[in-house]
Amino acid sequence: MQNSKVKTTDNKSRTGILLINLGTPDAPNTREVRAYLRSLLSCDRVLDINPIGRWLLLNLIVLPLRPSRSAKAYREIWLEDGSPLLVYSQKLRIALAEQFSGENIFVELGMQCGKPSIKNALDCLRKEDCDRIIVLPMYPQYSSSTFGSAVEDLYKEVLHDWNMPHLQIIQPIFSDSRFIDAWAKVGLPFIESEPDHVLFSFHGLPIRHLEKSDTSGNWCKNNHECCIDLVNENRNCYSAQCYHTAKLIAERYNLSAEKWSVSFQSRFGRDEWVKPDTEKHLARLAENGVKRVVVFCPAFVSDCLETLEEIGIRAAEHFRKHGGEELKLIPSLNDHPEWVFSLASIIRQQISG
């Protein structure tokens, strides 16, 4: 792993920055995708069902059937240097390290599934003798299956350390003005092309995940009416946070209510998931006369299979099949200078806080 070291000779305290993302297969082939899916779906925060049922589903249905299809999809978007998620995440790490050059601040990347691992990233920070570690799970909206699992994986790695590191976890940034500004900057050229409609497509979740986050026990109704506005009762709701992110970005462009909407993608299995489904929503838009649509994916800060293949290829084909003419995917934040600057600012605030 290329280490983003900034060598210094003074005795100031040393701070580590740990970026955590989901991970990716090592190669776009069936064997590597199977290993990746086994790691991902073995997590009880992702597949939160009975352990026996999870084992049966994983080993009798998912792993025998899905890896070959997913490997084909990965080949469609694989870059010369590897998986887009890993390539863009590493570029972001390097750019952030440059932001903190000469400050006794060290930036590492750890993946929950695959390489470089969280353990490897922590080992690199230990070698730099960091006094504290600022942790940023790269999931802007909170869900137990993403942000929650990242924090759990982190603590599993440090649980048995004799010298337990001082960890500071940056909370979800779904409403942070710097995060919103970065998306507004990246999306501006696409908005200036005056599309018929702007869609904000977020990763979906099973409804039971939203219900588990409803501490009141009676707020979640599985319809967008209970999610449109972020209030105290739904502050932990992933869907409400997604709507809030979309609303803030739309406000940056002064989009009227009928010009934008929210949907959820990447459905898996037969359980009921949060609605509306992205493909079905795109079909309705096309059938209602929308010809040109641009799509933000603000749950993904780095382009990956879910953005490039699922939206950029499959959803675009689906939209045209139902009468639409053009679907443009707005790139993720990746290592865009505005995002690097915004992220550095968020981290500095945590350091000084």
Image (tube, rainbow, N blue to C red):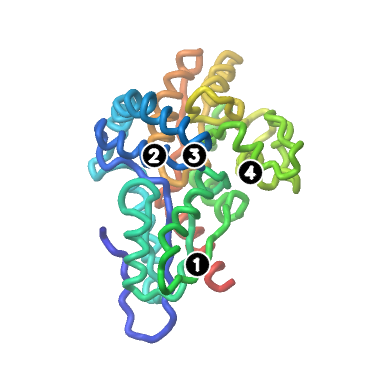
The mark lying in front, picked from 3 and 2, is 3
Identified by mark 3, the residue type is Val
Q: Residue furthest front?
A: 52
Q: Earlier in the sequence, mark 2 or mark 1?
A: 1
Q: Give the residue at x 30% y 42%.
A: 83
Q: Earlier in the sequence, mark 4 or mark 2?
A: 4
Q: Secondary structure at mark 2?
A: loop
When the figure is inspected, residue 62 is found, relative to residue 289, above or below; the finding is below
Calculate the distance from the C-alpha at mark 1 to the C-alpha at mark 4: 25 Å
The mark lying in front, picked from 2 and 1, is 1
Q: Secondary structure at mark 4?
A: helix
Quadrant in which the C terminus is drawn: bottom right
Q: Earlier in the sequence, mark 3 or mark 4?
A: 3
The residue to which callout 4 is attached is: 241
Q: Earlier in the sequence, mark 1 or mark 4?
A: 1
Identified by mark 4, the residue type is Gln
Calculate the distance from the C-alpha at mark 3 to the C-alpha at mark 2: 18 Å
The residue to which callout 1 is attached is: 167
The residue to which callout 2 is attached is: 304
Calculate the distance from the C-alpha at mark 1 to the C-alpha at mark 3: 24 Å
Q: Earlier in the sequence, mark 3 or mark 2?
A: 3
Asked if residue 187 can be seen in this view, the reply is no
Mark 3 packing: few (<14 Cα in 10 Å), some, or many (20+)?
A: some
Q: Is residue 197 left or right of residue 328?
A: right
Q: Is residue 137 left or right of residue 89?
A: right
Coordinates of residue 334 in the picture (x, y in percent):
41, 48
The residue to which callout 3 is attached is: 46
Q: Secondary structure at mark 1?
A: strand
Identified by mark 2, the residue type is Cys
Calculate the distance from the C-alpha at mark 3 to the C-alpha at mark 4: 19 Å
Q: Give the residue at x 66% y 46%.
A: 236
